Amino acid sequence: MRLSQVFRQKECVFSIEVFPPKKNGATPESLYPTLEKLAGLSPDYISVTYGAGGGKAGLSTVQIAKHLKQELGVEPLAHLTGINSTREQVAETVQALQDAGVENVLTLRGDICPDAPRSKDFFHASDLATFVKSKGDFYLAGACYPEGHVESENLRQDVENLKYKLDAGVEHLVTQLFFDNARYYRFMNLVRKAGIQAPVQAGVMPIVSARQVQRTVALSSASLPPRFTKMISRYDGDEAALFDAGIDYAIEQLRDLIEGGADGVHLYAMNNPEVARRVYEGIRDLLPEAKA
Ligand code: FAD
């Protein structure tokens, strides 16, 4: 099913993101038990990230998306990046997605990595979106940044630049993670004022461990509201308490977003089905049934 249908049927779409297993030697199959648990939460779709550099990582994305679609009956959204790939490589992945019956693709530029050869074919997500559209009848989604993409001069320009991918065929946007809903509301204001009417899903990541604080929070350029930083310092050294507090923070953030009229919420659950289940339990009463 194309995700356009889901957005027509639901006032607030609920999705979860997974990534192909990254540990040395881990196979896509090792993620299947997790996928089964996530499927039990009835997400409208599950998105599967695409490893930088493509190649083998890309095959894992296709395999996981195929498993979701064919074995678990969950609609997949396969991520795809262009920055390190040639047209031929992307065409191969797109063909594999088509063969697997995957209809929905999140077209991304990918992060610029100084060590990897940069594509001569794809500079921006919009170039990839145009190319994927030319290869088949796909539904396309794209990324957006409530606090501005790191390379953009300012938020207003970044919002204007979203029009390139929308003009290239992208039909809905998913935000980068953020911890301060006020930033998201300000961004949405700019998006709608710029005349962009596409649905925008708010991406939220529950922070549930000290490791995640070091990795994700320290590396992300997301601004941290005082309530969030207080939570991190209050539970420093107490993993169980930080886990519970992180779940509660995400639930509160998501409830506010759903009640605030977000077109959808996207859960960055880091392949942790327990985190996804707890968050889902905390918001399920607000998630709407499909319209008749
Ligand atoms: P673009 O849309 O190309 O934007 C990049 C920059 O260029 C922005 O500053 C933008 O304002 C500007 N810009 C865009 N178009 C133009 C134009 N035509 N002319 C001039 N400037 C322009 N990375 C992965 O490697 N794998 C993943 O699976 C993955 N999934 C993601 C999922 C989500 C929801 C998000 C938010 C990000 C994801 N990323 C992923 C990270 C993403 O690849 C990076 O953030 C990357 O740096 C930008 O990707 P983009 O598609 O937004 O690029």
Image (cartoon, grey):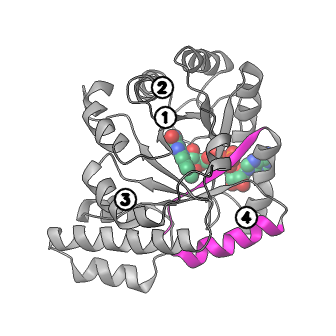
The circle on residue 50 is 1
Q: Which one is in front, 1 or 140?
A: 1
- Lower position in the chain sequence, tag 4 or tag 1: 1
Badge 2: residue crowd in 10 Å (few <14, some 14–19, many ≥20): many
Q: Please state the horizontal and vertical placement of residue 200, each as a whole percent of the image.
A: 65, 57
The correct choice, above or below, for 187 with respect to 100 in the image is below
The circle on residue 58 is 2
The circle on residue 153 is 4
Contact flag, marks 2 and 4 (Cβ < 8 Å): no
Mark 4: amino acid: Glu
Q: Could you tell whether 292 is left or right of 275 in the image?
A: right
Q: Residue at x 73, y 64 (%)?
A: 153
Q: Which residues are magenta?
A: 169-193
SS under mark 1: loop
SS under mark 3: helix
- State the CA–CA distance, disc 2 to disc 1: 6 Å
Contact flag, marks 2 and 1 (Cβ < 8 Å): yes
Mark 2: amino acid: Gly
- Lower position in the chain sequence, tag 3 or tag 2: 2
Q: Please state the horizontal and vertical placement of residue 12, each as a whole percent of the image.
A: 58, 58
Q: Residue at x 68, y 20 (%)?
A: 87
Mark 1 vs ligand 1: CB below 8 Å:
yes
The circle on residue 280 is 3
